[in-house]
Image (tube, rainbow, N blue to C red):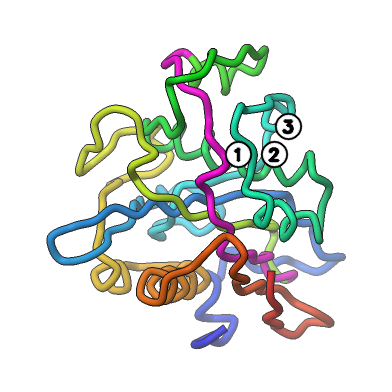
Amino acid sequence: MSGVGKISQYMSQGEYRDGGRAVKPKDAATLILVRDGDDGPKVLMGKRAAGHKFMPNKFVFPGGKVDPGDSRLKPPHDLHPAVLKRLVKHCSESRARALAMAAIRETYEETGLVLGEPDTPTLKTRSPQWRQFLQHDINPRLDTLHLIARAITPPYRSRRFDARFFMANANLIQGDVHEAPQGSGELLGIHWVSLRDAQELDLPHITRSILIEVERRLEQGHSPEDEGPYVHFRRGKLVEDRI
């Protein structure tokens, strides 16, 4: 990916793994919400608290680990067939849907924003995380999510994630779209920021690279079939494939 730098630019000193075998990455999902602004498109970002062991004080998009409950719900609108096809090159169909569900759930938990539709019978679940979401009588809607990238945390980190990056338009949000949404407190200073201003924030390297991909897609147009970068390590070397 353009601009990939040295390890010192990619991680803080406290994130080095102290010997041993590389930690197995956990499945995670991120959602990039885009809305129109007076000065062009804006994306929703927040700052990770200083106490976080993974990327503290960095501005990121909402997202997090896949939860067991993410694979147990079947929303009325499935992933676009092209998105599902691209995801299942590396995982099962059930896992592919769970990744997309995690992106929506984590966005709700971290920002308080409910993404989905109110016009179908509300799903039932035993998952405490999803019960909180579904109490708004909104079902998650997967068919509007675009898969734009995948990235696996470097093997020299003590915490590793296999993250899929989804993108969706903010018109999927039900209710008011506040300039500074409030969520669980895991992300601080949540706000809508222009793509240009976002590049001036203190970002993880991968987030900066994903912003470039977002801008490219918004400028050139894109479809669910369009591939995106897949950033990972092979034999200790940084590799960019396509997903």
* In the image, residue 5 above or below residue 214: below
Mark 3, secondary structure of its residue: helix
* In the image, residue 180 above or below residue 230: above
Mark 2, secondary structure of its residue: helix
Mark 3 highlights which residue? Answer: 71
- Name the N-terminal-most of marks 1 and 3: 3
The Cα–Cα distance between marks 2 and 3, rounded to whole angstroms, is 5 Å
Give the residues drawn in magenta, as a range.
135-155
Q: How many marks?
A: 3
The Cα–Cα distance between marks 1 and 2, rounded to whole angstroms, is 6 Å
Q: Residues within 10 Å of mark 1 (few under 14, many from 20)?
A: many
Decide if residue 154 is on the left or right side of residue 211: right
Do callouts 2 and 3 mark residues in contact (Cβ within 8 Å)?
yes
Decide if residue 53 is on the left or right side of residue 136: right
Q: Residues within 10 Å of mark 2 (few under 14, many from 20)?
A: many
The image shows residue 52 at horizontal and vertical percentages of 50, 49
Q: Is residue 148 found inside the magenta-colored segment of the image?
A: yes
Q: Label 1 is placed on what type of residue?
A: Ala
Mark 1 highlights which residue? Answer: 102
